[in-house]
Amino acid sequence: MTFTQADMTTFELGRTFDVVTCLFSAIGYAQTVDRLDAAVSTMARHLVPGGVLVVEPFVKPDEWVVGRVAVETPVDDGRRALVRMVTSDRVDDLALLDLHYLSGRDAEVEYSHEHLEIGLFTFEQYTAAFETAGLEEITVDTEGLIGRGLVTGVRPER
């Protein structure tokens, strides 16, 4: 198996596929509508005629909550623990997330922080990107795999 690290808006793998997927809301890292269009076009170029592109969106702009604080404790067995606290903000159509991690093991505690900026796109913007990329049979499933939706399109046979 080959892994390639590249920018989703410009990658070139030199081959085409029956299916290209962009799952787990990774498309949000495109951040802007222009980069969304470029990313979808780049993915579509990697489809065989009749191939399918599947994109799982991030949160829609009207559903993003500013000022939210969420806490998760995925591990706590008495000897080791991991806690993640996430805060949310927004600038225009960018969701801003600050993730704060506390990791403890054998009485030692470490702190780390991660800042994310993720694009908030509407289903109409996804559909437009698929159309711009020349895809057909575009469908939007508003529920999708985990409630964020799923957008699919087919590269024409011609």
Image: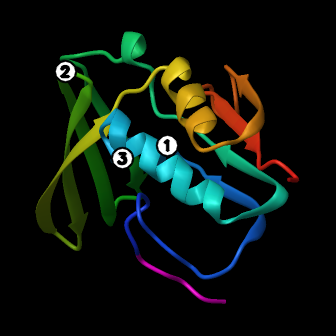
Magenta segment, principal secondary structure?
loop
Q: Earlier in the sequence, mark 2 or mark 1?
A: 1
> Vertically, is 150 above or below 106?
above
Task: Give the residue type that dot 1 points to.
Answer: Ser
Mark 2: which amino acid?
Answer: Asp
> Is residue 89 visible to the viewer in this orientation of the structure?
yes
What stretch of residues is rendered in magenta? 1-5
Tell me what residue is drawn at x 43 percent, y 49 percent: 38
Q: Amino acid at mark 3?
A: Ala
- Spot occupied by residue 143 in the image (x, y as percentages of width and height): 69, 22
The answer to which image quadrant residue 85 occupies is: top left
* Residue 110 within the segment the image draws in magenta: no
- Determine whether, in the image, residue 33 is placed left or right of residue 11: left
Task: Give the labeled residue for mark 1.
Answer: 25
Label 3 or label 1, whichever lies nearer to me, is 3
Q: Are circles 3 and 1 on residues that touch, CB within 8 Å?
A: no
Per the image, the residue denoted by label 3 is: 30
Q: For the residue carrying disc 3, how many other residues have a C-alpha within 10 Å: few (<14), some (14-19), or many (20+)?
A: many
Q: Is residue 26 above or below residue 19?
A: above
Residue 73: percent from left, percent from top: 36, 44
Q: Is residue 33 left or right of residue 16?
A: left
Which label number is shown at residue 92?
2
Residue at 22 percent across and 37 percent down: it is 97
